[in-house]
Structure formats: structure tokens, C-alpha cells
Image (cartoon, grey):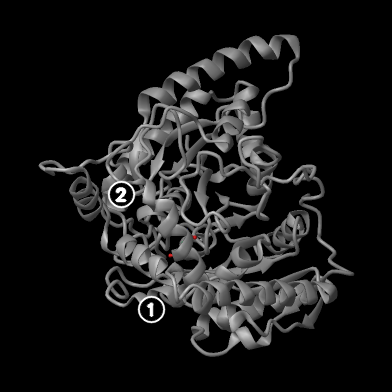
């Protein structure tokens, strides 16, 4: 019995009706995590004991609850994997870094408390690029994650372990973080659904900060409905994070039925200029075919312009590095994780700790970020980037006057080879061309699988919406899934 083919509601119902048990489901998930970690390296910690104990508790409480008719929590017994930059009490939170290699936070992130309150069972912490900086997972201090579709290729990043764990059927749901695409891009490269919610939709409390004006916890799932269900659970105002908004959390799964979908009246924005240079021809053809599907479902396709999108990589890598240089100043050996030995005095201890504790990409970003914030350059780089960010937001506001969602590829290419871009930071950064805009503007984005390339690598398309338009994105993504179900499974999978 594996969770791979069930959606989470069906799985929960099978557990609560007694057809199976949380124990059996969680055990198969933990077994798969352990077995497939050999080829994939998706998990940095697998918590067999904690997960099994909790599954047994859930079985017990379901047994007593069912008797008195109490409703069963939405995720009762559902195994979930958590990116290793989200704090879970009693587990490690390394952020894929040597500097936090041994860090065990004394508290849960708010999203974790909410998952647990809904009955989820945490099976482990997933591998990621160091401090979520990367697009390939090659920047983890604990080795790269392999793509379950082809282990010579990257799973995308930075939440590659979470994406690989869902794609391989180890868990039906995983959390990641998305600062510039780190949920959507690995989702596309691994053939699963990935959501970055509106900035302020869910709490960042307990998510280790990379770039605070861009960071958001995102969700991976095998289908849109599962992702929508989990968003409803983890979202909403949190007094620990002042950037969470007091916007009511709707029932995100309402209306996601299996009936034929009529999208009459829906308007899909097509930004033609983003379908040009640098886009792989198979990815382009595949996403254009999605546009045709939407047309067939009754949607109207309208041309939209995002004139400032061409600056988004430059703007992102100024703002993200500036914020990172400040956020990462706290890792100095004094309070958290690793501390260099044999440093004769305090300043040398700081220096040695950071030199030995951080990897090359993190150091590059700290230096870039410090530079763009330094006296004399601040206005020219950081100030200018903030201005262009405002223009980009205006581009989106304008575009959403004529459409409900904008369609783009999620990634310009399918999964590339491990090592192919690791010596060329610019080539690596260009992967993020379609995803960083949503973080800069604060809007939600979802990536949905739309087929395989000729060498059997997944391709994903992205839908971007206005603030708080997750219900629209879910409706459109779900309609596509119903019309063109993606049923392929990777060679490295619990089924095989
Ligand atoms: N790939 C982007 C970067 O390297 C995005 C990372 C993220 O979303 N955490 O910064």
C-alpha cells in the first residue's frame, strides 16, 4: 500500500473509515523515503520513530473520535515532507548548510503547527540548496538531489528534495520555500504541482529568512486539489509574522469538481514577448498547446504586455542578495550551529566560522548584496532596483485589467545535467526568468505539469494571478488537469 495514487482526501477517508490505518500509510512512506534516498538524496533527515509514534496516536484518536461522530481533521494520517529551512521542533534545520548543520530549533514554524493541528504526519526534512540559494540543488552542503526522471539531472531548486519526494511518490504533499521560484521551478522539472501563494497569505514565522520581502512558504502536491486543500490549512493571519494579511481564507477546494469544466468567460493573458529568445522549442510548443486547451475549454486568450519583465533577473539578484547579506549576518558562530575551532579572538572566530561554514554561492551572494548596499552604490543599484520593482508591479496590475491569469513556461528548459551550469552563475540565474517576477510583484503563481519532452523529462507551465487570486489559479489549473491528466510516473518511484 503506497500513497502514490490517492489524492489526500481519498487517502484520509480510507484511513478514517478503517480501510487502512495511518500507521500503514506512514510506514510505507517512511520505507520509501529510506529506500529511495540512496538514488535521490532527497531527505536530510527521516524521522521514522517520530512519524510512527504520531501515526499510532492518530489511529487511536480516530478510533475514539469516530465513535462520537467528531469530524476527522483534514490531513489525519497524511505523510508530509518539509524543506530543511522550515523549523520543526525536535528535528534538524540545516538549510542545506554546514553552518547550521547541527541546529535543532526549539520551536515550530507556524505552518508546521497548522499542519500538525490538521493531523499531518511529518516524515522528514528535505534537502535543498544552501539557504535556498540556487536553481538546481547543487548548492547543498550535503550533496545534490537527483531528479527521479533521470538521476544524471538536477531536480531544480532550491526546494529540490521536496519536489523529488513528491514526484517519486514518497509523500503526497511537501512544503518548500519560494523566494524567486524555488517551489515552482523544481515542481516543473520533476512533474508535480507547485504553488507560491500571494505574499502575506501564509506565515513566514519559522522559515529561515533568505530575502524577507520575497520569501513565501509554498506547497508541492501531485495535483492542484491537494495543493489547494493544504493552502487552506496553512494560510491566514499569524501574530508572529506582521506581513501576514487579515484576508479571509476561502474554501480553496470548493468548485474543484471532476465535472466537465467550462471556462467560458475566463480570460488567459498571453505575454508573447516572453515566448522568444532562450526558450527551449519543446517547452514552447508544450506551453502553446496548453493555451489551445484553454481555448477549447471556452476561455478567451488575450495578448498582454509586461514591458519591464526583461529587467526582472537583474532586479531580483540585486534585491535578493541585498536582503540575504543582511539576513545572514546573524550566522557568526556565536548563537547558532557551527563555530570554528582554534580562533584566538572574537573577530577571527566570526571570520573563520563564516569562511568554513558557508558554501561558495552563499558567499558570492553575501558579497554581491553587501556591494549593492554599500555607500556610493546604494542608489545606483539597490535604489534603482526598487524603482524597477515598482514598475513591474504596475505592469502586472495593468495586465490583470484585461485577464484573470497570465500563462508562461515555468522554466525555460526541462531538467539540465548535474554539473552543466554549476560553473556559470549567470546561466544558472537565467533559469529563473519566468519565476522571479511573481516574487518581485508579490503575486501568486502555480506550476502545473503539461507533458514530457522527447527524452522523457517533465515540462511545466505557470499561471500567475493578481493578489489573492489563488481561487482563480486553482480553478484554471484544475480545469487543465481534468482535460489533460498527467499520469506519467518517473523511473525512480515507489510504484517501480
Ligand atoms: N533560484 C533562485 C535563487 O537562486 C530562487 C531561490 C528561491 O526561490 N529560494 O535565488
Can you see residue 411? no
User: Which mark identifies residue 178?
Assistant: none
Seen in the picture, residue 110 relative to 53 is either above or below; the reply is: below
Of 78 and 277, nearer the camera is 277
| Residue 314 placement (x, y as % from top left) | 50, 78
Left or right of 49, for residue 305: right
| Residue 143 placement (x, y as % from top left) | 26, 54
Q: Residue at image x 57%, y 28%? A: 116
Where does label 2 land, which residue? 97
| Residue 451 placement (x, y as % from top left) | 55, 69
Seen in the picture, residue 75 relative to 16 is either above or below; the reply is: below
Q: Secondary structure at mark 1?
A: helix
Q: CA distance from mark 1 to mark 2?
A: 22 Å
Q: Secondary structure at mark 2?
A: loop
Q: Residue at image x 76%, y 51%? A: 258
Of 75 and 369, nearer the camera is 369
Image quadrant in which you'd find residue 336:
top left
Left or right of 48, for residue 108: right
Q: Residue at image x 44%, y 52%? A: 327
Where does label 1 land, which residue? 426
Of 185 and 388, nearer the camera is 388
| Residue 268 placement (x, y as % from top left) | 77, 74
Image quadrant in which you'd find residue 242:
top right
Seen in the picture, residue 468 relative to 334 is either above or below; the reply is: below
Amino acid at each position: 500500500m503506497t500513497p502514490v495514487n490517492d489524492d489526500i482526501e481519498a487517502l484520509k477517508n480510507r484511513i478514517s473509515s478503517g480501510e487502512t490505518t495511518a500507521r500503514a500509510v506512514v510506514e510505507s512512506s517512511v520505507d520509501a523515503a529510506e529506500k529511495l534516498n540512496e538514488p535521490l538524496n532527497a531527505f536530510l533527515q527521516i524521522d521514522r520513530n517520530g512519524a510512527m509514534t504520531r501515526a499510532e496516536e492518530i489511529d487511536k484518536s480516530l478510533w475514539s473520535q469516530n465513535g462520537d461522530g467528531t469530524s476527522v481533521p483534514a490531513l489525519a494520517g497524511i505523510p508530509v515532507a518539509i524543506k530543511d529551512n522550515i523549523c520543526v521542533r525536535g528535528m534538524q534545520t540545516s538549510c542545506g548548510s554546514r553552518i547550521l548543520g547541527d541546529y535543532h530549533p526549539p520551536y515550530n514554524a507556524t505552518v508546521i503547527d497548522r499542519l500538525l493541528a490538521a493531523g499531518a504526519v511529518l516524515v522528514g526534512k528535505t534537502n535543498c540548496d544552501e539557504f535556498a540559494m540556487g536553481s538546481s540543488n547543487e548548492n547543498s552542503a550535503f550533496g545534490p538531489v537527483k531528479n527521479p526522471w533521470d538521476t544524471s539531472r538536477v531536480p531544480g531548486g532550491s526546494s529540490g528534495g521536496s519536489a523529488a519526494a513528491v514526484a517519486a511518490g514518497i509523500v503526497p504533499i511537501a512544503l518548500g520555500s519560494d523566494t524567486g521560484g524555488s517551489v515552482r521551478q523544481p515542481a516543473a522539472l520533476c512533474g508535480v504541482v507547485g504553488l507560491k501563494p500571494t505574499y502575506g497569505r501564509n506565515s513566514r514565522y519559522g522559515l529561515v529568512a533568505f530575502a524577507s520581502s520575497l520569501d513565501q512558504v509554498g506547497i508541492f502536491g501531485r495535483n492542484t486539489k491537494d495543493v489547494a486543500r493544504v493552502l487552506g490549512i496553512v494560510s491566514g493571519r499569524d501574530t508572529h509574522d506582521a506581513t501576514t494579511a487579515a484576508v479571509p481564507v476561502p474554501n480553496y477546494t470548493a468548485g474543484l469538481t471532476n465535472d466537465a469544466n467550462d471556462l467560458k468567460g475566463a480570460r488567459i493573458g498571453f505575454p508573447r514577448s516572453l515566448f522568444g529568445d532562450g526558450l527551449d522549442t519543446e517547452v514552447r510548443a508544450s506551453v502553446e498547446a496548453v493555451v489551445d486547451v484553454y481555448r477549447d475549454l471556452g476561455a478567451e486568450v488575450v495578448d498582454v504586455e509586461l514591458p519591464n519583465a526583461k529587467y526582472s533577473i537583474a532586479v531580483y539578484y540585486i534585491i535578493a542578495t541585498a536582503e540575504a547579506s543582511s539576513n545572514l549576518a546573524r550566522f557568526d558562530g556565536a548563537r547558532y550551529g557551527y563555530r570554528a575551532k582554534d580562533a584566538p579572538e572574537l573577530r577571527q572566530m566570526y571570520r573563520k566560522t563564516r569562511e568554513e561554514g558557508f558554501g561558495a554561492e552563499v558567499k558570492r551572494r553575501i558579497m554581491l548584496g553587501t556591494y549593492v548596499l554599500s555607500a556610493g552604490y546604494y542608489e545606483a543599484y539597490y535604489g534603482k532596483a526598487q524603482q524597477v520593482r515598482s514598475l513591474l508591479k504596475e505592469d502586472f496590475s495593468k495586465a490583470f485589467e484585461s485577464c484573470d491569469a497570465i500563462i508562461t513556461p515555468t522554466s525555460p528548459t526541462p531538467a539540465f545535467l548535474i554539473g552543466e551550469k554549476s560553473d556559470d552563475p549567470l546561466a544558472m540565474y537565467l533559469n529563473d526568468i519566468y519565476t522571479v517576477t511573481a516574487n518581485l510583484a508579490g503575486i501568486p503563481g502555480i506550476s502545473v505539469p503539461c507533458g514530457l519532452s522527447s527524452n522523457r523529462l517533465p515540462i511545466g507551465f505557470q499561471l500567475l494571478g493578481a493578489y489573492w487570486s489563488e481561487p482563480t489559479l486553482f480553478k484554471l489549473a484544475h480545469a487543465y488537469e481534468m482535460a489533460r491528466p498527467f499520469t506519467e510516473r518517473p523511473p525512480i518511484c515507489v510504484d517501480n
